Image (cartoon, helix red, strand yellow):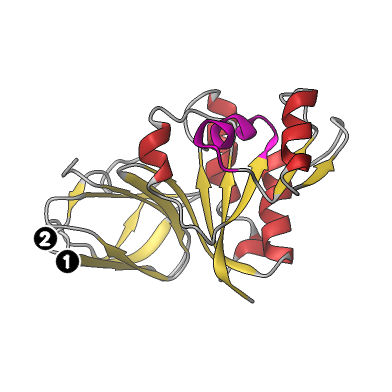
Amino acid sequence: MNANRAVIFVNGVLEDPLRAASLLRAEDWLVAVDGGLRHLQALERAPQVLIGDLDSVDADGIAWVEAHGGRVLRYPPEKDDTDLELALLLARTEGYTTIRLIGALGGRVDHLLGNLGLLAQPALAGLDVRIVQPGTEIFLVRERAEIQGRAGDLVSLLPLFGVASGVRTEGLQYPLRGESLLPYRTRGVSNVMQGERAAVSLEAGMLLCVHTDTHG
């Protein structure tokens, strides 16, 4: 397995590229998902891989990637997987166990929901995959997870694809002690961290954890 991180730039909304740059490390393996290349160009960071059907990238963008030694993996538009799903599976195949997605929020609602659903891809089980943007991280909880932050941060726990049962929390203002969270109820929204660490576990189902830094 690769000890470094794969950071995948998606063609969604990136309101503050300079703040997004603070999320990167020098050793990150960078992947541009089709039009997500524009975000990396704004940061002047060339990706190791450009992947997708490339309907949102012009010839100059492709040439820029190749001039910096990056691979270009072009797929036909008629395919069953989205460009992001292809990128996630590539990162897994390359041995990365820590994967961050930037620019995966905003834009089209169907793309947003699809991107959130991809966190539950069975092939990614056991990997640390998170959608990140300045001040927010979103990740899937299958059995147990810890949350690192600060007192006052918001934590929302949202059941994905059905009921999440046996949910228990530690370090949150409104504790859960083995209850079920239902997909048509909002009980898990906007809990509050009491310190620098919180934890959540569940017996069955899956949860989306949305951790928001309230300190700016």
Q: Is residue 19 above or below residue 4?
A: above
Foreground pick, 132 / 29: 29
Name the residue that disc number 2 marks: 194
Residue 6: quarter of image: bottom right
Decide: few, some or many residues near mark 1? Use Cα within 10 Å; few <14, some 14-19, many ≥20.
some
* Residue positioned most to the bottom: 1
Question: Could you tell me which quadrant the C terminus lies in?
Answer: top left
Q: Nearer the viewer, residue 104 or 7?
A: 7
Q: What amino acid is found at the position of numbered circle 2 in the picture?
A: Gln
In screen coordinates, is 163 left or right of 210? right
Please count the marks in the image: 2
Mark 1 and mark 2: span between their CA atoms?
6 Å
The residue shown at (45%, 52%) is: 24
Q: Residue at x 52, y 47 (%)?
A: 101
Residue 15 is at least partly visible in this image = yes
Crowd tier of the residue under label 2, counting other residues whose Cα lies within 10 Å: few below 14, some 14–19, many 20 or above: some
Question: With 45 as the anchor, is 173 left or right in this view?
Answer: left
Q: Main secondary structure of the magenta part?
A: helix
Residue 44: image location, x then y, percent: 55, 37
Residue 107 screen position, x and y as percent: 52, 23
Question: Mark 1 touching mark 2, by CB under 8 A?
Answer: yes
